[in-house]
Amino acid sequence: MAGLAVNVDHVATLRQARGVNYPDPVAAAVLVELAGADGVVVHLREDRRHIQDRDVRVIRQIVQSKLILEMAATPGMIGIALEVKPDQVTLVPEKREEITTEGGLDVVMHKDMVAEAIKTLQGGGMKVSLFVDPSVDQIKAAHKVGANVVELHTGDFCEKRTPRAMAAIQEAARLARKVGLEVHAGHGIDIRSIKDFVGVKEIQEFSIGHSIISRAVFIGLDAAVKEMLALARQV
Ligand code: PXP
């Protein structure tokens, strides 16, 4: 029975497309929680293409479940996190020209920088998750640098839906739980692909945004969150 944290970035994408003050991701955060989600996720990107600093601060004040802030491990972002104090920070790699977060954080390559960021954020009372590709080496490195959580990047699986891609997720999830890490999963998951995770008991929480906000355009946010929540509970 997995949890569901809902990413509301794309409500802000719609707002930024017109440079107006609606639709407000703050209102989306309220509705997502009322629908029963276990958490609200926002990604404050360096280029501020969707979520703005004001959104993070206001959502921090109104969220009653938990707030997860996705961000790059830069000094500026770490400063914002220490001030806003989300319940969890998820460190992600960020390239300005990418459409969305394309790959996991290379913890093996950047272990000293990541370890330092984790120490600072945990010192500020936050739990730290690392968004990583489902690879044994990345899980071992995440454990070594002191992360609380690993979020397995499911983008490759959701694109291919192959047994090989699923096997990589299962292996990474098992190892992560074995070494005591909390296991989350996200990226590219929709109401069809989430069913492929049934039986992967190591996954404790899904982080899903784009497909839920897209469904919400047609069936409403409350219904879109509830339908995904019911599917996550079956995993
Ligand atoms: N988890 C992380 C770390 C992400 O960066 C994203 C995309 O912002 C997601 C989950 C959600 O992905 P999607 O919007 O494809 O559901």
Image (cartoon, rainbow, N blue to C red):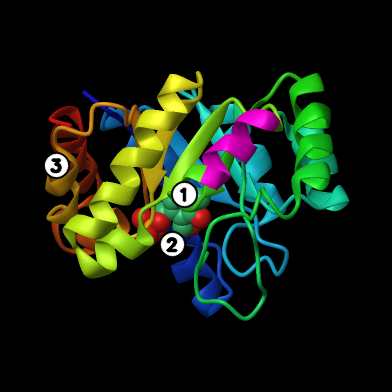
Taking the spot 74% from the left edge, 33% from the top edge, the residue there is 84
**Whole-number angstrom distance, CA of label 2 to CA of label 1:** 28 Å
141 falls in the magenta region: yes
Across and down, in percent, residue 112 comes to 83, 43
In the image, the segment drawn in magenta is: 137-144
Res 107 visible: yes
Q: Are marks 2 and 1 in contact (CB under 8 Å)?
A: no
* Residue that label 1 marks: 135
Res 24 visible: no
| Residue type pointed to by label 3 | Glu
Judge whether 76 appears above or below 62 on screen: below
Q: Which mark is residue 227?
A: 3
SS label for mark 1:
loop
Across and down, in percent, residue 43 comes to 58, 52
| Residue type pointed to by label 1 | Ser
Say whether residue 194 is left or right of residue 78: left
Which numbered mark, 2 or 1, is in the foreground of this view? 1
| Residue type pointed to by label 2 | His
